[in-house]
């Protein structure tokens, strides 16, 4: 599946906030930081903890479970190099946040 999903109007995810969307069998977390939107799986690759509501600084999200730091721009785990967070392309199209899954 490489289709674009229209999620919500941009005003539904203000700068500095997050919003969770169920897409098929997974939950996708959208994070809005400054001029960028990031889209990732809501599950930390360490032990599957939910990432919704976790602290975000720039493009780094810190899992509340064990403090693992994950790069939202490329999915790499800074804490444990062999772990990878599934990330998705996200774009703003005609005032809507859209994700490719």
Image: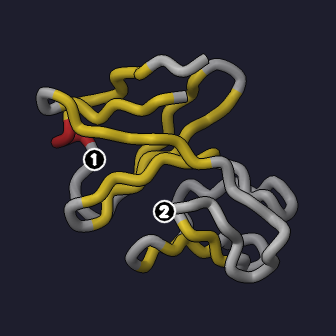
In the rendered image, residue 35, in percent from the top left (x then y), is placed at: 21, 61
Q: Residue 85 carries which label?
A: none
Q: Is mark 2 on a helix, strand or loop?
A: loop
Quadrant showing the N terminus: top right
Q: In this view, does 53 lie to the left or right of 30?
A: right
User: Who's the residue at 41% across and 22% down the image?
Assistant: 4
Single out the residue that lies furthest toward the left.
94
Give the tally of numbered discs. 2
What residue is shown with label 2? 73
Q: How is the image coloured?
A: secondary structure
Q: Residues within 10 Å of mark 2 (few under 14, many from 20)?
A: some
User: Who's the residue at 57% across and 24% down the image?
Assistant: 23
Q: Is residue 4 left or right of residue 44?
A: left
Q: Nearer the viewer, residue 100 or 7?
A: 100
In the rendered image, residue 43, in percent from the top left (x then y), is placed at: 71, 50
Q: Residues within 10 Å of mark 1 (few under 14, many from 20)?
A: some
User: Who's the residue at 79% across and 58% down the image?
Assistant: 45
- For marks 2 and 1, give the CA distance: 18 Å
In the rendered image, residue 73, in percent from the top left (x then y), is placed at: 48, 62
Quadrant showing the C terminus: top right
User: Who's the residue at 30% across and 39% down the image?
Assistant: 91
Which of disc 1 and disc 2 is earlier in sequence?
Answer: 1
Q: In which quarter of the image is residue 27?
A: top right
What residue is shown with label 1? 13
Q: Which of 27 and 92 is in front in this view?
A: 92
* Picture layout, residue 55 above or below residue 11: below
Q: What element carries label 1?
A: loop
In the rendered image, residue 63, in percent from the top left (x then y), is placed at: 66, 70
Q: Are marks 2 and 1 in contact (CB under 8 Å)?
A: no
* Picture layout, residue 82 above or below residue 95: below
């Amino acid at each position: 599946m490489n289709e674009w999903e229209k999620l919500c109007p941009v005003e539904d995810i203000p700068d500095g906030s997050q919003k969770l969307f169920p897409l098929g069998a997974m939950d996708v977390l959208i994070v809005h930081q400054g001029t960028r939107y990031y889209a990732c799986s809501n599950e930390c690759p360490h032990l599957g903890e939910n990432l919704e509501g976790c602290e975000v600084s720039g493009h780094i999200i810190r899992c509340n479970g064990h403090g693992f730091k994950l790069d939202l721009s490329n999915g790499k785990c800074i804490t444990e190099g062999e772990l990878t967070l599934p990330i998705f392309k996200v774009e703003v199209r005609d005032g809507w946040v859209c994700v490719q899954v």
